[in-house]
């Protein structure tokens, strides 16, 4: 069992964020050790999923629905597919930006942002 302080330390989240996630139904504590909430070690995997989803732009409500999804939930599955498309577009945009920045780091064109190669890597 991990107490709330250990979970917070291992994940980098504030204890208040863990309590908030619990209040929203994303986490479930397994009990208390004195006044401190305790969690099963698997909570670390759940928090990694939540953190990844948050960084990908999912709302708390979307994550909540995702965590209880079943194969029969066709509406949610369609939304997941839509979100995957948006993420693919974001990934492509970020890869273009990374490639442009890598080029700019060694480019001698003045100004850098007017370099034809820099502009070409940014183009969709």
Image (spheres, rainbow, N blue to C red):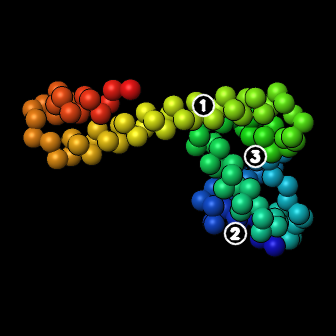
Q: Secondary structure at mark 1?
A: helix
Q: Nearer the viewer, mark 1 or mark 2?
A: 1
Reading the chain from its start, which is encountered first: label 1 or label 2?
2
> Which disc number belongs to residue 20?
3
Mark 1 touching mark 3, by CB under 8 A? no
Residue 36 versus residue 9: which sits nearer the camera?
9
| Residue 73, horizontal then vertical, whole percent | 87, 34
Q: How far, Cα to Cα, is label 3 from label 2?
A: 16 Å
Q: Tell me the crowding category of disc 2: few under 14, some 14 to 19, or many 20 or more residues within 10 angstroms, Cα based.
A: some
Viewer-nearest residue: 98 or 3 = 98
Number of other residues with Cα within 10 Å of mark 1, as a class: few under 14, some 14 to 19, many 20 or more: few
The correct choice, above or below, for 42 with respect to 100 in the image is below
x and y percent of residue 95 in the render? 40, 40
Tell me how far mark 1 sits from mark 2, CA to CA.
Answer: 36 Å
Q: Please identify the quadrant where the N terminus is shown.
A: bottom right
Q: Give the SS element for disc 2.
A: helix
Residue lying at 57% horizontally and 35% vertically, measured from the top left: 87
Image: 62 above or below 16 = above
Q: In which quarter of the view is residue 112 placed? A: top left
* Label whose residue precedes the other's in the sequence (3 or 2): 2
Q: Position of residue 55 (x, y in %)?
A: 58, 43
Residue 26's mark?
none
Determine contact: label 1, label 2, CB under 8 Å.
no
Residue at the spot of label 1: 85
Does the image show residue 103? yes
Q: Quadrant of the C terminus?
A: top left
Which residue in the structure is indicated by mark 2? 6
Left or right for 95, reference 65: left
Mark 3 crowd level (few <14, some 14–19, many ≥20, 10 Å Cα): few
Q: Give the mark, 1 or 3, whose residue is nearer the N terminus.
A: 3
- Residue at x 43% of width, y 33% of height: 93
């Amino acid at each position: 069992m991990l107490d709330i302080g250990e979970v917070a330390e291992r994940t980098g989240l504030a204890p208040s964020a863990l309590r908030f996630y619990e209040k929203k139904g994303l986490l479930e504590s397994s009990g208390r050790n004195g006044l401190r909430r305790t969690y099963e070690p698997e909570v670390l995997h759940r928090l990694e999923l939540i953190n990844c989803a948050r960084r990908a732009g999912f709302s708390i409500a979307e994550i909540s629905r995702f965590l209880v999804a079943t194969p029969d939930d066709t509406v949610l599955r369609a939304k997941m597919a839509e979100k995957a498309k948006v993420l693919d577009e974001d990934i492509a945009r970020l890869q273009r930006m990374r490639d442009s920045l890598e080029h700019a780091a060694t480019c001698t064109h003045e100004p850098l942002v007017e370099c034809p190669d820099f502009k070409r890597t940014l183009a969709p």
